[in-house]
Structure formats: structure tokens, C-alpha cells
């Protein structure tokens, strides 16, 4: 009886194995779909569907952005289906297969750039900074950590959303949780099914750009015909055999000792160029050694205006409650004087300019500015400096918080009334805070950039490290 039960169990295992093949058992919609594609579909039906739902409730630019994100995820699903049915392609062919995903990532990021004046700009930025996580399919051997890195890039903006709407609009908080859960679940998915890179099928044809993954057949429909058999393995080249034979012949020649020179032809004096100069003039190219490497020169563009994008117009205007100062160059007398407490200022892509903001304002953001000087009276919220270089900021009144992110070169001049200001920095360098003295001068203090982290047995402890000497 035990042997009979054992035989029945083995038969069931074989049947289950057969049923995993495309269209072999059952009428379910998952017929012929790889397990990791089904797991990705579960992600789409769970966190992604929740994110789409809440984005529709928020509406506006967030809803449009969510539709673009969904299109990118569907492009990724198409690649996963193809990988489950095809063998791994060549590197060039794989680049072409990745093109739909990369193009959709670009669409998502361009939407943020075109809507910098949006009231939901933080939402757009959180999505735009993290959407490259879809590129994990091209990452090996550690795609999982790449997804986490892109998720962390969104945290800067999602924290701002939470700070702004925490006690005001629960729907915005739910939006943040739903969006971040997509990447959390994706990281877990990649870790389980694609630990060292995108998993390709061991059978089937080699994937090409023109290969189309068949859609799942409707319930009860006949299964699609099987794909063509895999191409025959290429015939082994004889290069390795030839190399081995050549090396063997070489060693055989060397082992002949002095006899190795017996096959050399004698060169008489009339055949030597240093004794017969006439041979030098008989033509034939004179071979020289290899030329040193030189960097290739860029091709000259006959019409450079065709490649340079049109210059964006300079702006200094009030749009609703937002002051927009954009694309200013070499402007040294920019002034915003008619301010209100509810207004904010957004300064974008200004170079070699000086801006003064009078009165009390809610917040100020400097984004992608270079060699900009900012002087302001009072800010009740926060002053943010992002993606900028060589900027100087001077506080004449009070400001509670100054945030410096992804910035190289930033001088902050505090007033006597703003000495209790909190300065938060991340991914930045060459930051200095200047404190006023009794004589009216300033004393400069550098913001630490180097840290030491140790494990104390219970948690990580980080302290500032000063370079000796």
C-alpha cells in the first residue's frame, strides 16, 4: 500500500509539472503565463491600482502623471512576458527592447519639467525622481538595491508632501503611502524572482526587437501554437584549436635550440638598406610604429542653431500666490517688493544674478541656479536650495529653516535675529555659514561634509570627522 501511495504522489507531481506548460491544463486566464509575470500582475492589481485610484481622486497633474507611470509599468510587463518566453538576446538587441521603457521614463520626467509652476510640483518631483526604478531590468547583478536607491530619491519630496498635508488633507498622505508602496513591493518582487538580473527563458527563440509576446488567450480558447524551435547552436569556431596548435608549433621550434636558425635566409650587403641607400628610394610604404592615442575631434556642425534648443524667456511675475523668477542671466537688480505672507517664491535656472525679496513671505526655493545672490527679509517657512552651484544667501530678518540639497558651493549669511535657524544639508559640498560679529563683520564656519559611523552594539552612531592636519 505504501508503494502505491508513493507512485500516486509521483504521478500527481508529473501532472502538476505538465500543467505548468502554456495552455496545457485548465481554462484560467493565467494559462501559459510565467510565475514571475503573474507576480508582477499582482503588483499591478494591488499597489499600482491603489495609486492610480487615489491619483484620480487628487486629479489634475497628478492624475495625468499617474497615467504615464501606468504606461511605463505596462511596457515593463510586456518585456517580462517576452523574457519568460524567449532566450536572452545580444546586448544590442536588448538595448532596442529596453527602448519603450526608457522612452516612457523620459515622458514622465519631461512632464515634471514642463509643469514647474504646478501647485502639485512636489508630487510630480517625487514621481520623476523615482521613475528610473523601472530600469532595474537592465541592472545586473544587483537590480534590487537599484530600485531602493531610486525610491530613496523620492523621499525628499514625499517628506515635503507629508509635512505640508499631514494635518490638512489625508488624501495626500494616502497618495504618498500608495506611491511608495509600489517601489517597496517592486524591490521585494525583484529580490524574489530576479535576484541577479532579469530572468530569461532557457528555451524558445532568442528575443529580438520584432518578436511579439502573444497575449493571454481568452478562457476556453484553443492554446496558441508553440513557438518555433530554438535555433541550432552555432558551430564551434576553430580559433581555440588553431591557437593551441600555433602555441605547440612555437614551443617545438624553440626546443630545437641552435637549429632554429638553420631555416633563416642569409642577407648579403647589397640587400641591407644602411649599406645600399638606393633601396630606400624604391618605393613601398615604410611601416612605422603605432601612433599615440588622440581624442577624436568633435565634428563641426555646419548649422549650430539647429542643435541648440531655443533660449527660454526670462520671467519675474506673480502667478497666483507664487512669484516665478526664471531664466534670468546677468541681472543684478532683481527686486520683489510687494509681498504677502501667503506667497512663495520659486527661483529657477538663474545665472550671475542678484535677487532681493522685501517683506515677509512664506517660503523661497532656489532650483538649478548658478552664481546667484539672494537677499531676503523674513521667511516664515523654509528656504530651499536644490541642484545649484556657487550661491550666496543672506538673511536680513528671521528664517526658521534652510535646506541645502545637491548643491556645490553655498554661503549662508545669518542675521543676529536668525542665529537659531536650522540648516539641513544632504548630498552637498563647500557649504559655509557666516555668523555676524559685534563689529559688523562675519565669521565663517564650514558645514561638515565628512562623517564617521560606528555600531555601538544597539544602533549606528554617526559623528563628524575632522581631517587631521
Image (cartoon, helix red, strand yellow):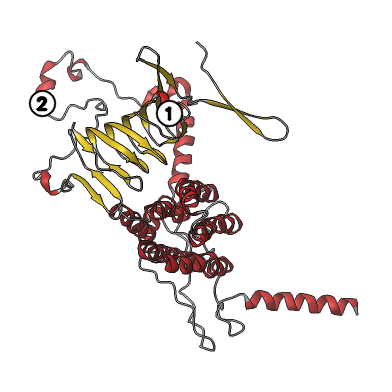
Which mark sits nearer the N-terminus, 1 or 2?
Answer: 2
Residue 58 location, x and y as percent? 43, 65
Quadrant in which residue 345 is drawn: top left
Residue 128 location, x and y as percent? 39, 53
Q: Residue at x 45, y 40 (%)?
A: 243
Pointer 1 with pointer 2, Cβ within 8 A: no
Q: Is residue 421 above or below residue 360?
A: above
Q: Is residue 164 left or right of residue 43?
A: left
State whether residue 78 appears in this view: no
Quadrant in which residue 349 is drawn: top left
Q: Nearer the viewer, residue 424 or 89?
A: 424
Q: Nearer the viewer, residue 316 or 146?
A: 316
Q: How many marks?
A: 2
Residue 460 location, x and y as percent? 65, 33
Residue denoted by label 2: 282
Q: Is residue 203 above or below residue 349?
A: below
Q: Is residue 393 left or right of residue 249?
A: left
The residue mark sitting in front, 1 or 2, is 1
State whether residue 352 appears in this view: yes
Q: Nearer the viewer, residue 216 or 390?
A: 390
Q: Residue at x 25, y 34 (%)?
A: 355
For label 2, count other residues whose C-alpha is less than 10 Å away and answer few (under 14), some (14-19) or many (20+).
few
Secondary structure of the residue carrying numbered label 1: helix
Residue denoted by label 1: 418
Secondary structure of the residue carrying numbered label 2: loop
- Measured Cα–Cα span from mark 1 to mark 2: 87 Å
For label 1, count other residues whose C-alpha is less than 10 Å away and answer few (under 14), some (14-19) or many (20+).
some
Amino acid at each position: 500500500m505504501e508503494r502505491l501511495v508513493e507512485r500516486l504522489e509521483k504521478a500527481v507531481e508529473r501532472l502538476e509539472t505538465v500543467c505548468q506548460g502554456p495552455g496545457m491544463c485548465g481554462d484560467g486566464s493565467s494559462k501559459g503565463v510565467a510565475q514571475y509575470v503573474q507576480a508582477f500582475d499582482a503588483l499591478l492589481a494591488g499597489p499600482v491600482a491603489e495609486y492610480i485610484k487615489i491619483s484620480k481622486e487628487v486629479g489634475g497633474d497628478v492624475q495625468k502623471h499617474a497615467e504615464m507611470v501606468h504606461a511605463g509599468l505596462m511596457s515593463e510587463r510586456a518585456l517580462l512576458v517576452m523574457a519568460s518566453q524567449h532566450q536572452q538576446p545580444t546586448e544590442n538587441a536588448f538595448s532596442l527592447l529596453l527602448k519603450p521603457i526608457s522612452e516612457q521614463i523620459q515622458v514622465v520626467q519631461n512632464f515634471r519639467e514642463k509643469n514647474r509652476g504646478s501647485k502639485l510640483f512636489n508630487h510630480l518631483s517625487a514621481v520623476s525622481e523615482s521613475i528610473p526604478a523601472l530600469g532595474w531590468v537592465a541592472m545586473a547583478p544587483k537590480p534590487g538595491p537599484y530600485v531602493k536607491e531610486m525610491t530613496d530619491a523620492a523621499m525628499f519630496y514625499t517628506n515635503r508632501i507629508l509635512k505640508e498635508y499631514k494635518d490638512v488633507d489625508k488624501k495626500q498622505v494616502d497618495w504618498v503611502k500608495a506611491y511608495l508602496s509600489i517601489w517597496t513591493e517592486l524591490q521585494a518582487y525583484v529580490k524574489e524572482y530576479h535576484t541577479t538580473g532579469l530572468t530569461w527563458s532557457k528555451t524558445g527563440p532568442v528575443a529580438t526587437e520584432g518578436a511579439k509576446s502573444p497575449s493571454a488567450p481568452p478562457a476556453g480558447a484553443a492554446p496558441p501554437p508553440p513557438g518555433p524551435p530554438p535555433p541550432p547552436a552555432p558551430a564551434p569556431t576553430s580559433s581555440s584549436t588553431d591557437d593551441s596548435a600555433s602555441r605547440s608549433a612555437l614551443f617545438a621550434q624553440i626546443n630545437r635550440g641552435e637549429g632554429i636558425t638553420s631555416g633563416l635566409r642569409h642577407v648579403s650587403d647589397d640587400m641591407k638598406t644602411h649599406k645600399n641607400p638606393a633601396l630606400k628610394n624604391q618605393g613601398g610604404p615604410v611601416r612605422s610604429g603605432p601612433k599615440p592615442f588622440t581624442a577624436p575631434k568633435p565634428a563641426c556642425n555646419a548649422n549650430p542653431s539647429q542643435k541648440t534648443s531655443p533660449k527660454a524667456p526670462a520671467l519675474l511675475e506673480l502667478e497666483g500666490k507664487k512669484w516665478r523668477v526664471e531664466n534670468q542671466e546677468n541681472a543684478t537688480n532683481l527686486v520683489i517688493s510687494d509681498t504677502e505672507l501667503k506667497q512663495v517664491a520659486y527661483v529657477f535656472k538663474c545665472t550671475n544674478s542678484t535677487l532681493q525679496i522685501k517683506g515677509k513671505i512664506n517660503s523661497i526655493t532656489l532650483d538649478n541656479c548658478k552664481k546667484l545672490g539672494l537677499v531676503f527679509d523674513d521667511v516664515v517657512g523654509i528656504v530651499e536650495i536644490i541642484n545649484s552651484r556657487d550661491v550666496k544667501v543672506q538673511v536680513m530678518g528671521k528664517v526658521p529653516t534652510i535646506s541645502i540639497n545637491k548643491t556645490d558651493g553655498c554661503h549662508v549669511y545669518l542675521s543676529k535675529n536668525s542665529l537659531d535657524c536650522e540648516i539641513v544639508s544632504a548630498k552637498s559640498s563647500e557649504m559655509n555659514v557666516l555668523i555676524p560679529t559685534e563689529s559688523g563683520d562675519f565669521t565663517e564656519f564650514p558645514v561638515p561634509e565628512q562623517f564617521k559611523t560606528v555600531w555601538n552594539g544597539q544602533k549606528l552612531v554617526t559623528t563628524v570627522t575632522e581631517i587631521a592636519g
